[in-house]
Amino acid sequence: MTMIPERTMPAPIVDSVNAPFWQAASESVLMIKRCKACGEAHWYPRPFCPHCGSDDTDWVPASGSGTIYSFTVTRKAGPVPYVLAYVTLDEGVTMLTNLVGAEMEALHIGQRVQVSYAQAEGGGAVPVFTPTVST
Amino acid sequence: MTTIKRKACIAGAWEHPLRKAPDKTTAQLHYECARGALADAGLEFKDVDGYFCAGDAPGFGMLSMVDYLGLSVRHVDSTETGGSSYLIHVSHAAQAIAAGHCNVALITLAGRPRSEAASGVASAAKPNVPEVPFEAPYAPVTLNAYALAAMRHMHEFGTTAEQLAWIKVAASHHAQHNPRAMLREVVTVEDVLASPLVSDPLHKLDCCVVSDGGGALVVVRPEIARSLKRPLVSVLGAGEAVKGQGGGRVDLTYSGTAWSAPKAFEEAGVSPQDIRYASIYDSFTITVLMQLEDLGFCAKGEGGRFVADGNLIAGVGRLPVNTDGGGLCNNHPSNRGGITKVIEAVRQLRGEAHPKVQVPGCELALVNGTGGMLGTRHGSATLILGRE
């Protein structure tokens, strides 16, 4: 069994729209966007709702719990292997992410995961996910 | 509804013979492809009044290339949907010709990723791209964005690595007859599975080659095509689509082809059972499998069984696919396989494919392309072409 190697994350790209997301991440809170007009959550966060077009959206904290939708151990595209994944949050949106803190061979689709925060260059924090049960 | 059915013909098609071109510039390769396709059609640069290019065109793209090539055009289109762009260009050229906006449309693709060591695994972390802040930290590259779709397909439908490998095996059987193909050695399912895992579940041999080169097409008004000496290849139907993440409602079990294909079949008035040859974009083996399902050649989830046991090999299986060896074995100029897919379909319809892989009496062919990244956001385009 091989643990997923640790990898330095690049510094978050912060702009006027996504600044609240990265501020919350540095405080270990995963934020998503929810539309006040149609009630739907969306990912990745935008200053409007891609489901209905309204610009009346709120940042809301997510539980940080989710399920692996798909994943791949990428072995030949960086200095160390890493695990790219889609995680479906309990709030219903599916986000691209990395899986960390687990044995590569034990990962499987449908596994429950919980958010954690990887330190990034320059001191920021990037949400990543770790299986809650190592089965 | 207006239709493009039989409103335009592909009169010229030319594939650059080089697979490595360290001593040529990208713009020069575009020129050589344009010259080749025009000569194939029996036309000259001065006949061109419409021009189409995509993201591989250097400099200011359309503006640089029209000026560089010395064209005098009254219709231009630089639709950019990655490797599928050139299929959409054929469709848009047919629309423009049907609307009277041009008579002779030139489409070019060229690039040198092999000489420039740009294998398509570099992360595209450009500024001002809305998804990049939320994705770049996780290092999605072309390779693993397709692997995510392959992994989910296996989970949902029980597709196996052996079944995916059959797609490479078929490509290699065709490439052995193509003297210009980069990989001409016939491989087995075992060879594919024994090659290193690069991004689970994709092995090295599940991936296309990286090559320099290019290609060009000339799409013309039917009256002009009939005055030329080449066999008549008509555009019968086309469809295009863009599929993304749906605002967080990600579903990797199907591609945009599920949307582009029905439009093309409806316009052409034919069904998948009528198709005698198919060029299917093969950036990776999984790309082919998902497109075959979404095109309706088999039911969703049945792609693994459909491609197994040589079913895509000319003279062996039910549906010959990519008889030039495709991107998996022949070439993948500019990391974009769309134009070479159209070119091989034109060869099949003209009866000019290699005799070992020529489909006898091939009168109806399909070309399908995806571009961008299957696992995040991609374009899809479907073309149905017929020999008159």
Image (spheres, coloured by chain):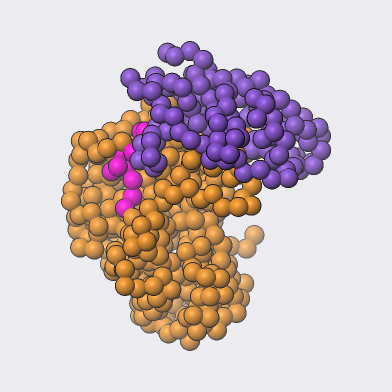
Chain colours: A purple, B orange
Magenta stretch: includes residue B317? no
Q: Where is residue B280 in the image (x, y as percent from the top left)?
A: 39, 51
Tell me the quarter of the image containing the N terminus of chain B.
bottom right
User: Residue B358: where, in percent of width, then height?
Assistant: 25, 59
Is B143 left, or right, of A63 in this rendering? left
Query: Residue drawn at (31%, 68%), measured in percent from left and top?
Result: B21
Task: Tell me the magenta residue range.
Answer: B198-209
On the rendered structure, is A30 left or right of B167? Answer: right
Asked whether the viewer can see residue B250, the reply is: no
Q: Quadrant of residue B234?
A: bottom left
Quarter assignment of residue A127: top right
B178 and B143: which is toward the camera: B143
Tell me residue B291's x, y (percent). Answer: 43, 44
Q: Is residue A3 above or below residue B326?
A: above
Which is nearer the eye, B68 or B151? B68
Can you name the residue that lies furthest to the bottom here?
B46
- Give the residue drawn at x 23%, y 54%: B183
Q: In this view, does A108 lie above or below B27?
A: above
Is B226 positioned to the left or the right of A12 in the image? Answer: left
Q: In this view, does A37 lie above or below B174?
A: above
Q: Residue furthest front?
A: A122
Residue A66 vertical position relative to residue B218 in the rendered view, above or below: above
Q: Nearer the viewer, residue B179 or B345?
A: B179
Q: Where is residue B290 in the image (x, y as percent from the top left)?
A: 43, 40
Is B207 magenta? The answer is: yes
* Quarter that holds the C terminus of chain B: bottom left
**What is the quadrant of residue B292 in the picture?**
top left
